[in-house]
Amino acid sequence: MNQQELKDFLDAKVIAYNTLEFIDSDPVQIPHLYEQKEDIEIAGFLAATIAWGKREMIIKNSHKMMSFLGNSPYDFVMNHTAEHLEAFEHFVHRTFNLDDFKYFITALKNIYTHHQGIEQVFEKYQTENSLQPAIHEFKKLFFELPHQSRSTKHVSDPLKGSAAKRINMYLRWMVRKDNLGVDFGIWKNINPSKLSCPLDVHSGNVARKLGLLKRKQNDGKALLELDTALRKMDPLDPVKYDFALFGLGVFEKF
């Protein structure tokens, strides 16, 4: 395929997968449980944090986290006490355990109390054409409280070479407004053109087969290469192609 044929092919796949039906099998369904902005932000952040492994288990454990928070994530984060956290029952998702979960609740309260919320951090540290430096700054603020060193691995740092798949997916949810009911677009002061594609095994393999990506590792350098290719096809909304790459990989075994 030439460049125009590739764009037409991927645009068609975006239309096929960027639909309400996508929500039913995706972790994005967790923030869709809520209507208040802060509830959506927190539910989305926690669901994205554990979004690796089998999708059914991601969704199951995300619902479990919401139940721990009384299905009112913002209210719980802002008003919880140490006793509330100690009352949590056993929780684990892959390498994300109960201690990590407790710290994340504490850190989120700190972000909203002392840094005006998640959105404000990313808005403050965004650059002219990227949110990757803002992820780095967010991670520093998120872990400014006393914490176990093991917990830091659950927020990736693109400035240390990570593709930061999960948090880039979260940023897509918050920033991109698709008018189709999947991505929320509730962060109004960050341009979707700055978003980076959530790069994982599925999207990476499809991107390589389509000639969008040559680098073999799914790391920060590969992300930059993929972003550059996708922004050529749609400078205003490059990460819409995440639906195409993911759908081709997961649903069509491309």
Image (cartoon, rainbow, N blue to C red):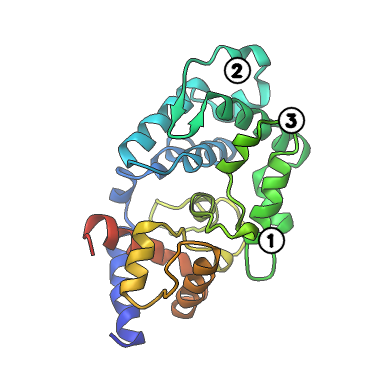
Q: What separation in Å lies between label 1 and label 2 (alpha carbons)?
A: 33 Å
Task: Decide which of tag 3 and tag 2 comes sooner along the chain.
Answer: 2
Image position of 88 with respect to 226: above or below: above
Q: How many marks?
A: 3
Direction bottom: furthest residue: 2
15 to the left or right of 195: left
Q: Earlier in the sequence, mark 3 or mark 1?
A: 1
Q: Dot 1 lies on which element?
A: loop
Q: Position of residue 152 (x, y in %)?
A: 62, 40
Residue drawn at point x = 32 percent, y = 55 percent: 19
Circle 2: element type: helix
Q: Residue at x 28, y 60 (%)?
A: 249
Q: Quadrant of residue 7?
A: bottom left
At a point 66% along the width and 31% down the height, the residue shown is 148
**Given the image, on which type of amino acid does mark 1 rest?**
Gln
The residue at the point 48 percent across, 43 percent down is 48
Quadrant of the rendered structure where residue 159 is? bottom right
**What crowding class fits label 2: few (fewer than 14 Cα within 10 Å), some (14-19), or many (20 or more)?**
some
Three-letter code, disc 3: Pro
Give whichever of 207, 78 is nearer the camera: 207
Instruction: Note whether residue 237 is visible.
Output: no
Q: Earlier in the sequence, mark 1 or mark 2?
A: 2
Image-based side of 13 in relation to 49, left or right: left
Most distant residue in the right direction: 114
Looking at the rendered image, the quarter that the C terminus falls into is bottom left
To which residue does mark 2 refer? Answer: 85
Q: Is residue 82 visible?
A: yes
Local crowd at mark 3 within 10 Å, few (<14), some, or many (≥20)? few
What label does residue 146 carry, if any?
3
Q: Amino acid at mark 2?
A: Leu
Image quadrant holding the N terminus, namely: bottom left
State the separation of the CA atoms marked 3 and 1.
26 Å
